[in-house]
Amino acid sequence: MIRTEKYKKGLLSGLKTVEGQVRGIAKMVEEDRYCVDILVQLAAVKAGVNKIGLSILESHTRGCVSMAIKEGKGDEHIDELIDILSKFVK
């Protein structure tokens, strides 16, 4: 799949945001911050990662899986998609 520059910039921006949040959480732990505050930030990281993952899953489904189905090779790609979805939702 070919990703547009705009799409890649969006993914990278989201990843950089998550990276910054994780660094902030590490600092919070070092500073012995309140547990609930740390947990709130961890929830934000989880939401950010999920948002990025869902964007990639959507792109993969609409691009790679759709193309494979049109080419008669859908079963393998659908199995792969189901496998990664099961890992993603754990």
Image (tube, rainbow, N blue to C red):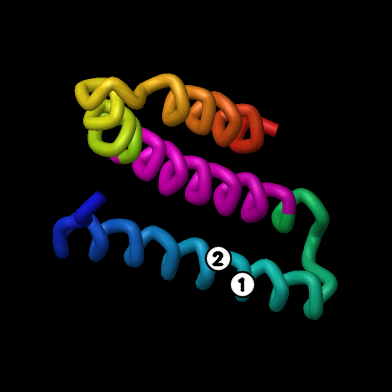
Task: Report the side of 31 relative to 59 (left or right).
Answer: right
**What's the residue type where badge 2 is placed?**
Gln
Instruction: Give the image quarter of residue 27.
Output: bottom right
Rendered location of residue 15, percent (x, y) = 44, 63
Rendered location of residue 26, percent (x, y) = 71, 73
Callout 1 crowding tier (Cα within 10 Å): few <14, some 14–19, many ≥20:
some
Q: Is residue 51 magenta?
A: yes
Mark 2 and mark 1 in contact? Answer it, CB < 8 Å.
yes
Tell me the quarter of the image containing the C terminus.
top right
- Highlighted range, magenta: 39-59
Callout 2 crowding tier (Cα within 10 Å): few <14, some 14–19, many ≥20:
some
49 shown above or below 74? below
Q: What residue is rendered at 42% in x and 37% in y?
A: 54
Which label belongs to residue 21? 2
Q: Looking at this view, is 19 or 76 the one in front?
A: 76
**What's the residue type where badge 1 is placed?**
Gly
Mark 1 element type: helix
Q: Which residue is mark 1?
A: 24
Rendered location of residue 73, percent (x, y) = 34, 26
Instruction: Give the image quarter of residue 65.
Output: top left
Dominant secondary structure of the magenta stretch? Answer: helix
Task: Report the side of 36 relative to 42 (left or right).
Answer: right
Q: What residue is rendered at 42% in x and 69% in y?
A: 16
Q: How many marks?
A: 2
